Image (cartoon, rainbow, N blue to C red):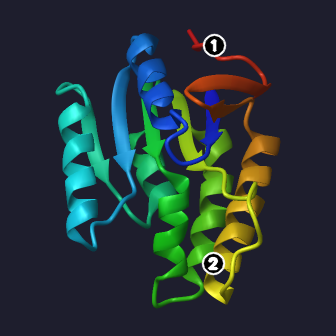
């Protein structure tokens, strides 16, 4: 199974993905995309690290997501990526402007070939007002385009609101 779990800030999407991972009975590899640029983010990352089960492997990868997925995917293993919008932010702010389209295309291309299960967590940012500033508008545009491409490609899409999952496409089932 490959699923996209979308929701707003504090919607319960990460908790839902982690619960699904625990219930799957699979070996879990947690792929974190966050980078800490300030004390608050350092504290958030530390909290998330401490709250994950000790037997889960954690890989911190802010940019080369497709490569990491290809290296870690295996039958009987579940990869949980949290989160795609932080990954997009890292790429948008990268000094090489070509990195974003290259990494995005690599991600979309590798998904059909991955063995095992995959949960992708991402913030739905297109429900509010049109943001001020060119970088923020580019961020919303890229996130929306990526979500549409993933939703078309993946078998399951869930939208989280107030801690409640709302299936948009498919159902959560574990292979084998």
In front: 47, or 88? Answer: 47
Of circles 2 and 1, the one toward us is 2
In front: 28, or 161? Answer: 161
* N-terminal-most mark, 2 or 1: 2
Quadrant of the image containing the N terminus: top right
Where residue 40 sits in the image (x, y, percent)? 25, 62
Left or right side of 43 for 96: right
The residue pinned by badge 2 equals: 136
30 vs 148: above or below: above
Left or right side of 105 for 81: left
Q: Residues within 10 Å of mark 2 (few under 14, many from 20)?
A: some
Where residue 102 sits in the image (x, y, percent)? 61, 73
Q: Residues within 10 Å of mark 1 (few under 14, many from 20)?
A: few
Residue at horizontal 37%, vertical 46%?
A: 31
Helix, strand or loop at label 2? It is helix
Residue at horizontal 35%, vertical 39%?
A: 30
Q: How many marks?
A: 2
Quadrant of the image containing the C terminus: top right
Helix, strand or loop at label 1? It is loop
Q: Is residue 76 visible?
A: no
Where residue 154 sits in the image (x, y, percent)? 73, 37
14 vs 141: above or below: above
The residue pinned by badge 1 equals: 173
In front: 79, or 35? Answer: 35
Mark 2 vs 1: CB contact within 8 A? no
Q: Which quadrant would residue 47 be assigned to in this image?
A: top left
Residue at horizontal 64%, vertical 38%?
A: 4
Where residue 15 sits in the image (x, y, percent)? 43, 29
Q: CA distance from mark 2 to mark 1?
A: 36 Å
Q: Is residue 160 visible?
A: yes
Left or right side of 124 for 81: left
């Amino acid at each position: 199974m490959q699923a996209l779990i979308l929701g707003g800030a504090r919607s319960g999407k990460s908790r839902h993905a982690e619960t699904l991972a625990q219930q799957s009975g699979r070996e879990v590899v947690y792929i974190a995309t966050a980078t800490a640029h300030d004390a608050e983010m350092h504290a958030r990352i530390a909290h998330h690290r401490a709250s994950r089960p000790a037997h889960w492997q954690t890989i911190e990868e802010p940019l080369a997501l497709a490569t990491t997925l290809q290296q870690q995917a295996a039958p009987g293993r579940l990869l949980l990526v949290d989160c795609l919008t932080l990954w997009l932010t890292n790429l948008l702010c990268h000094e090489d402007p070509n990195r974003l389209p290259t990494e995005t295309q690599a991600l979309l291309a590798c998904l059909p070939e991955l063995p095992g299960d995959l949960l992708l967590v991402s913030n739905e940012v297109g429900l509010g007002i049109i943001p001020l500033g060119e970088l923020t508008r580019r961020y919303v545009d890229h996130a929306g385009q990526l979500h549409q491409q993933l939703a078309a490609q993946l078998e399951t899409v869930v939208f989280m609101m107030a801690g409640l999952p709302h299936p948009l496409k498919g159902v959560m089932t574990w292979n084998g």
